Structure formats: C-alpha cells, structure tokens
Image: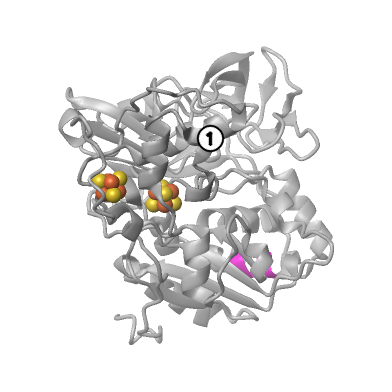
Amino acid sequence: MSTHEAGISGELRRFLRGGVSLEEHKEATAQTPITTFIPAEVTIPLAQHLGPPAQAIVKRKQVVQRGELIATAEPNGAPVHASVTGTVARVALSPHPTLTEAPAIVITVDPNAAAPQCTDDPAWATLPRDVMLARIEAAGIVGLGGAAFPTYRKLRLPDGVRVDTVVLNGAECEPYLTSDHRLMLESPKDVLRGAWLLAQIIGAQRVVIGVEDNKSDAAVVLQAAVEQLSLSPAPDVLLCRTRYPQGAERQLVEALTGRRIPARGLPLQVGVLVQNVATAIACYQAVRYQQPLLDRVLTVTGPGIGHPMNLRVPIGTLVQDIVAHCGGLDARTAMVIAGGPMMGRALGRLDVPVIKGTGGLLFLRVDDVQREPYGPCISCAACLDACPLGLEPNQISIYTEAGRALETESFGTRECFECGCCAYVCPAERPLVQFIQIAKAAFQTGSAIGLGVRPGVVHG
Ligand code: SF4
Ligand code: SF4
C-alpha cells in the first residue's frame, strides 16, 4: 500500500536550514527482521545513563533472575536489572564503551532457566499518572536514542512548564542503522501505545510520529495500527524528507510542528517532548507489564562484519560475542563505531558491553575510513551552508588550530551538537567536529590545550 492509500499526508515535512543528503547504506539490514541472541555471559555496567552510577546490591555466586533488581538508583540516576537468569560471577571494574573502565556486574547465563512470567496489568491505560511514572522510573528506562538521560526525569516536567505535543522520533537518519525501522514495522502497536502513554503522563493533547520517507513502509504500517487501536488522541504519522540530521531534536520539532527551539534551548521551551520509538516501547512495557529495560535492539552492520543483522540482545552482551554471532570480522576491518557513522563513538576494544544507549555497531574496513591528510581551509563556505544551526565551523577550526580555541564562542562552539554535516562536505577534509570538540574541552578547562593538535579523521 502506498502512503497516499494509507491516508498519510503527501506533504513531506522538512527542516529549513542546512543538512546533507548521505548515502544511506541501509540495504544490508532494512529487510532483516529482528532476531534474538543470548550470550553465555553478560557484563552489566552500573553506569549506563546520565547521572550517578547505580549501587550494586548483589554478590559473587548469587543466583539472579532476569528482571531482578541488581543495582539501586542514586538520586537522579537509574536502577539496573539482571538482563539474564544466571549466577553473579563477579562485581568488578570492567571495560566500558564510553568510560574506558567502570564497575560492572558479570553474570554467567543459566541456559536452562525458564523465562520469567510477565504480569499483565489490564488497567494499565487508566492508571494515575504518578503510578505510570513510578513504573517507568523503577524500570530503569533511559533515552534509547543515544542520550541515555533517565526517562522519568524527562517526563517529570518542571513547575509551570506545559507541553502540548509529544513528538516521537522515527527518523533514524544516521546511515546504516535500521533497528528503529524494524521496531516500527514489527511492533507498530507497541510504538503507538508507548507514545500515547507518554502523552497521558505529561498531559499532552497531540502525538506526532515523524518517519523519514525512506521508511515509508513503516509509516504505512503505523498508520494502519493507528486505525486499529482507536487511541485518543490518535497519533499523527507524518513523513519527513530524508535528509540528515532529520532525527535531531531541533530539526525534527521544526519539521513536524513548525516550532523553533531557541539556541541551546530544549523542546520543552516550545511545548514539545521528544522521545524515540524504542524508548516509547520500553515505557509501554514498563507500565503494562512492569518489565524493566533488559534488552537492546541494535543494528550490527557495515562492510567489516560477516553477517549484518538486527539483533535483540540482553544488556551487557559483549561486542566480541556479537561479532562471533554475526560471522566474524573481515580481515580489513579497521574501525568499530557504537552508533552511526556521523554521531557514533569509536570503540577501542571489542570486550566492551552493549549498554542501554547502544543503538548500533558499525564495522568499517580500511577502505571505508577516510585517511587523507587534511588541508587548510579554502574559504569555500560549504560548511556554513551545511550547518543546520548556522554556525561557523570553519572559523572554529582555524582559531583552534592556531591555539585560540577560547576565542571561538561567538562562532557557535557551545551550540554545536556535533552532527558532522560540516565535516562531511568540507573539500579540504578538515576534521571540523574534532576541532570543535577540542574547543569545547578548552572551554571546560579554561585553557587552550590542544594547541598544535591535529585531530584524526574518523568519518567513514
Ligand atoms: S557539527 Fe556543529 S558546526 Fe558542524 S554542522 Fe553540525 S552543528 Fe554545525
Ligand atoms: S568547508 Fe572546509 S574548506 Fe570550505 S570553508 Fe568550511 S572549513 Fe573551509
């Protein structure tokens, strides 16, 4: 069925400034249904969210059930649960994908354990808001679009703040990644129930789901589910033009609502709450089934991996175990990125776990990774045209290169959200995002360390 036949408005929503058209590279996994992989052991870090790490409450040799609380939340943090049934092998410092090393609970999986029973609360949709919110908090849910901010904190609106619209992010604008696409295709009703639930909690009257037009099949499936579920308010499924960074909060809100978030501001300031589709599903499962966040659906892809696929894995599954499950690495694999190629983070090792915020694993070969030495700025202004915020990355790079990073604030260093559009279009191959990161670090330390540093190039 076409989007027109499905009753979806033919008008493509778009953000107005900058952005780039990228090669999508989604074909390897877009049609690959999500399958489940359970390793022999998981390493579950206590720090997986923005905020203080959780505190372990289990000991070595203790038997734990999938879903059991194993680390309690500190104020403003999030709890951590056993993602598998098994025995605690140790609680110790372990490799971490973003922190180098952090305390973690290692659990040896019991392969014969029966799946724990779920409790289905038939009254879930009529629960008081504070009960819904408490279940989301107890489930340890964080933003699964990458930020890993505890979701209950985002849903607990500051006094006096009114939000009338929930925007659900189904854009998945990073190349290669298709896990959100698959979730929308395979679990459209759970996506919609989750979005509706979020609106109930914050008192929003409108729910809008933005899907890029390279995933119009997902939009059709969602629209059919809207008609079957008869939710009130009924979510609006809107198609967006496929253009990076359509999935960034500011760009998505502008495209779907016409509202412009102020510089360095939040969607709340224009009456909008943004969540991604995977987070919406997790919230629905937490409220209806009181199920903690235990698994992560992620895309494992790129020319460096044997069998690209969309996988559901228990949180704590090591990247090296996923690699083995997916057919191993190509001998020319040179880089592993957690996330997409534009905003993901390079991993230095494979013995790190999938955490709540891991949305993808991208394996690139030597040929895929840009290695050309970069040149001086030729003042072509391509980066200025590409920047969706209208910043001046060329100037930030020139000043930072000259050891004058502390003088770059007026060019927009603090506003930059490191989308990488500027670096993508730069004909001199200048690693503009790394220069901006150096400038931000200089602001933090108050000194322009990085003087003379020539950043490496990471974009594939
Ligand atoms: S990385 Fe920063 S400066 Fe570059 S295009 Fe994105 S927002 Fe603009
Ligand atoms: S795109 Fe590159 S070369 Fe062109 S103005 Fe920007 S930094 Fe300079």
Amino acid on which disc 1 is placed: Leu
Q: Of residues 18 and 293, which is closer to you in this image?
A: 18
Whether 38 is among the magenta residues is: no
Which residue lies at the image location 46% right of the left edge and 69% below the top edge?
210
Please give the range of residues in magenta. Answer: 195-199
Q: Position of residue 23 (x, y in %)?
A: 22, 54
Residue at which label 1 appears: 406
Q: Position of residue 405 (x, y in %)?
A: 48, 34
Q: Determine whether 230 is above or below 189 in the image.
A: below
Which residue lies at the image location 39% right of the left edge and 59% below the top edge?
181
Q: Is residue 209 left or right of residue 199?
A: left
Q: Position of residue 221 (x, y in %)?
A: 40, 72
Q: Position of residue 272 (x, y in %)?
A: 63, 68
The picture quadrant where one finds residue 117 is top right
The picture quadrant where one finds residue 74 is top right
Q: Of residues 231 and 3, which is closer to you in this image?
A: 3
Q: Determine whether 81 is above or below 255 in the image.
A: above
Which residue lies at the image location 43% right of the left edge and 19% below the top edge?
351
Tell me, yes or no, if residue 131 can be seen here: yes
